[in-house]
Image (cartoon, coloured by chain):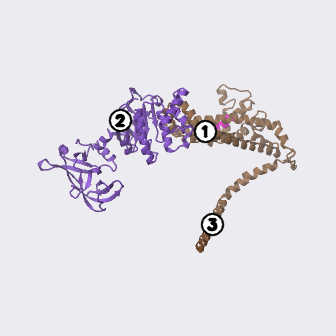
Chain colours: A purple, B brown
Amino acid sequence: MAEVSFNGVTKRFGDAVAVDGLTLHIPDGELLVLLGSSGCGKTTALRLVAGLEEATEGTITIGDRVVNDIDPKDRDVAMVFQSYALYPHLSVARNIEFPLRQRGMAKDERAAKVKEAAVTLGLDTLLGRKPSQLSGGQRQRVALARAIVRDPQVFLMDEPLSNLDAALRVQTRADIVALQSRLSTTTLYVTHDQVEAMTMGDRIAVMSHGVLQQVAAPEDLYARPANIFVAGFLGSPGMNLLPGKVVHGPDDDVTVEVSGGSVPLPTPWRFAGAHAGEMVLGLRPESLRLDPLGPLQAEVTIVELLGAETHVICATADGSRLIVRQPPQAAKPAPGEQVRIAIDPDPAALHLFDAVSTQRLAGP
Amino acid sequence: MTVTSLGVQSGAARGRTARRSRLLREAGLAYLLLIPALAAFGAFTFYPFFRNFKLMLYETPPVPGLPAHYVGLHQIVPTLTSTQFTQSLLTTLVFVVLVVPLSLILGLVLAVGAHRKLKGIGVYRMIFSSTVVSSVAVASVVFGTLLNPVVGLLPWLGINPSPPALENSTWALPAVAVITIWQFLGLSFIIMSAGLQSVPDELLEAAQIDGAGAWTRFWRMTVPLLSPTIFFALVVSTIYAFQSFGAVDILIGYQNAANLHANVLIYEIVTTLQMENNPGAAAIMATVLFLITLGLTLLQMRFLERRVHYAN
């Protein structure tokens, strides 16, 4: 077990910067999810820890060792690849045994370890098969078994669930979390799937264009996104983002004027008036409801029925998209209808971002 | 009810007829398109192939102008037991053993060396594969010069066999083998390179993280995963080595080949046919060569394919 740190790590491929000045500390035993869309640098960050890429600048430490110049095989990390990377010419048992054999472990000890890992992952009846004779889920478990069998300091997982079907993914997700929490091995888990990130991570690190945007526990990340990117990226559908301006009214009233209406700011947000200028107002779809007395006006464009909920997709006067998430029993407006939208009175339902720096303004 | 089922049956029968006539039309078109290829193969491959079996049954008198006469299977045993043939067969086997392993190993080593993401690696790939496009005549002239006892590379290296390499019964066959290896190297390199492209990088990376050093990764991952390719290259290079002719003809020639133990089977066949005007014996030897090649290919397929690991 060990902690992992990135200290000002940059990785360039020619002129392209894949990871830009990443500083991140993962405490011992944590499951940290690196989340971002493809090309954001999350996999490169993982490969830097594995030693499959060399950092252009900065240092990476595992435990108390700076590992920049240490061979992948000596870093004591185990990696689960997206494609599982099982050795196709070796049986399941030999696949799981491979890392132990490379470390020169005695035969009896090897056999015991392989057995233990196979039992843990329910593979004990498949040990004689070749990877080509296994289903996707079974292959995935072999890859996990090969990772846990040698009891490494760090697990590195690169989108290990993306090749599984939806139902199996939910099951395996839970299995991995349970396994990780039982073994308490520091884990870096890369995914582009925010549901995976939210459900699995002790903390989530959101990356975009090689830059770390925010690291926080899932609930904090959702409740207080640090910038416009994180706000829009997390949540399905993502946060509604309306460009607007802060206006000071009489009696210390402060409102945000956006296309479609003006939203009064509750007390905890009033300080924002000091920043009077271009803002972006963020509203989660679940904080909105259709209400004839609501402050915002928009035109309904599409109504999506998802079974458990309904998304009413609207457009404000300037064309900004505004999505309202409704319970399924709520009245459904027709496309083309003009509606008014009310906002949850909880001050935490509002998010304000500086339009220029895109950073969140301190609020509740 | 009856009317309906009859209607259905006749509809199905009509469908079958239509399908059959469509298949016939398609087959007709296919054969039409095959005619040019069949004509070329027929004239230059199938006809000579079967004609060869006929030639085996006739003996041509050593005096030019006299007609060949039918001897049935009677000249097969004398031909196959002649020193000329047995020595040539032995020479060929030695030649194959010299050429095949070396050209495969060198091709693999070069392919692994060039399978890197380095700047300018394309130049090396081009150089390594260039021997494919050099003709056997050019290669023979170049190597003939290199092996020249006066201006060649051997004296420069301090090696001065006497008589000179290409006139020396110890050196002649290895010299021809070197040229053949060099010539086949390009193809071997291309085949191995293509095979390496199909070995996923992630497997080697996984092995690296699992603790395998470069040597282990090569032996425990690359070679097994490349075994279908190596198997294919083995078959191709064996056939290639069995059919070598040009280098012997250009560098050693009819006068010396037999004396210098360099008369590989195909060379023996050609000289028997042309110099000794003995088509019957040549046809028998050609058939033996065909059977050896066929047998080897079948043997390799049967025994080696079992140990070949195909990826998913």
Instruction: Residue at the far top: name it.
Output: B158
Q: Which mark is residue A22?
A: 2
Q: Is A58 covered by the magenta stretch?
A: no
Q: Secondary structure at mark 2?
A: strand
- Nearest to viewer (mark 3 / mark 2): 3
- Classify residue A211 by image quadrant: top left
Q: CA distance from mark 3 to mark 1?
A: 47 Å
Crowd rating for badge 3 (residues with CA inside 10 Å; few <14, some 14–19, many 20+): few
For residue B100, side relative to residue A166 (left or right): right
Residue bounds of the magenta highlight: B177-182
Q: Quadrant of residue B254?
A: top right
| Callout 2 amino acid | Leu
Distance from disc 2 to disc 1, alpha carbons, whole Å, reads: 42 Å
Q: Position of residue B7 (x, y in %)?
A: 59, 72
With A33 as the anchor, is B165 left or right in this view? right
Q: Amino acid at mark 3?
A: Arg
Q: Earlier in the sequence, mark 3 or mark 1?
A: 3
Residue at the disc numbered 1: B227
Q: Dots 3 and 2: beta carbons under 8 Å?
A: no
- Horizontally, is B5 left or right of A261 in the view? right
In the picture of the structure, the residue carrying the numbered disc 3 is B16
Q: Secondary structure at mark 3?
A: helix
Determine if residue A81 is in view.
Answer: yes
Identified at 64% across, 36% down, the residue is B103
Identify the amino acid type marked 1.
Ser
A245 up-or-down from A185: above or below: below
